[in-house]
Amino acid sequence: MSYKKAGLISGAVGGVVLAAIGASLVTGDELNEQAQAIPGVDSQAITVYRSESCSCCKSWVDHLDKNGFQVEDVVTDNMRSIKRTHGVPRQMQSCHTAVLGDVVIEGHVPASDIRAYLKEPLFNTQGLAVPGMVSGSPGMETGRKDNFSVIAFNQNGGTSVFSEYKDY
């Protein structure tokens, strides 16, 4: 897996930090210790909004469960309203939306990236997204593995690549 972590550029100040992060499973206590960087966010509790008919969304919920998250699984028939309420830019949208406090996770974001973001949130961002429905991403294990990026985004439409999955 190739991993790239970058901050969004704000005015004339911006930076890129490269880091290698493994995708190991951790216990709930370790997960909670890792995410103390965002005050008020319980790193184990995540609310996932999804359509009842979407099986890949349920598979992503299972991925989060297996990786130490305590998932509140909310089935709704109004995903458009959920995305609008949480400020998910149109170009970042996928099939499900999750929230941890003020942090928004859109689509099939790997649990390891959620943990990394919670540990070191990027300045001027509101969350992470895997736009669309990429084969091989968590919940979309079809046997085919397409390259994909996890994107950090903000409410003003700014985006930056948080991590990349190539030849994983």
Image (cartoon, rainbow, N blue to C red):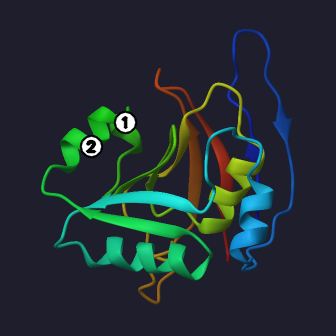
Residue 16: x and y, percent? 82, 36
The residue positioned 77% from the left and 42% from the top of the image is 37
Residue 86 is marked as: 1
Residue 51 percent coordinates (x, y)? 20, 64
The Cα–Cα distance between marks 2 and 1, rounded to whole angstroms, is 6 Å
Q: Is residue 54 above or below residue 81?
A: below
Dot 1 amino acid type: His
Which mark is on residue 82?
Answer: 2
The quarter of the displayed image where residue 2 is located: bottom right
Number of numbered discs visible in the structure rendering: 2
Camera-side residue of 99 and 83? 99
Q: For this view, does 56 lie left or right of residue 103?
A: left
Quarter of the figure with the N terminus: bottom right
Mark 2 residue crowding within 10 angstroms, few (<14) / some (14–19) / many (20+): some
Crowd band around label 1 with a 10 angstrom C-alpha radius: few (<14), some (14–19), many (20+):
some
Q: Position of residue 48 (x, y in %)?
A: 38, 60
Towards the viewer: 92 or 2: 92
Secondary structure type for disc 2: helix
Residue occupying the far left of the picture? 77
**In percent of the image, x 37 and y 57: which residue is there?**
132
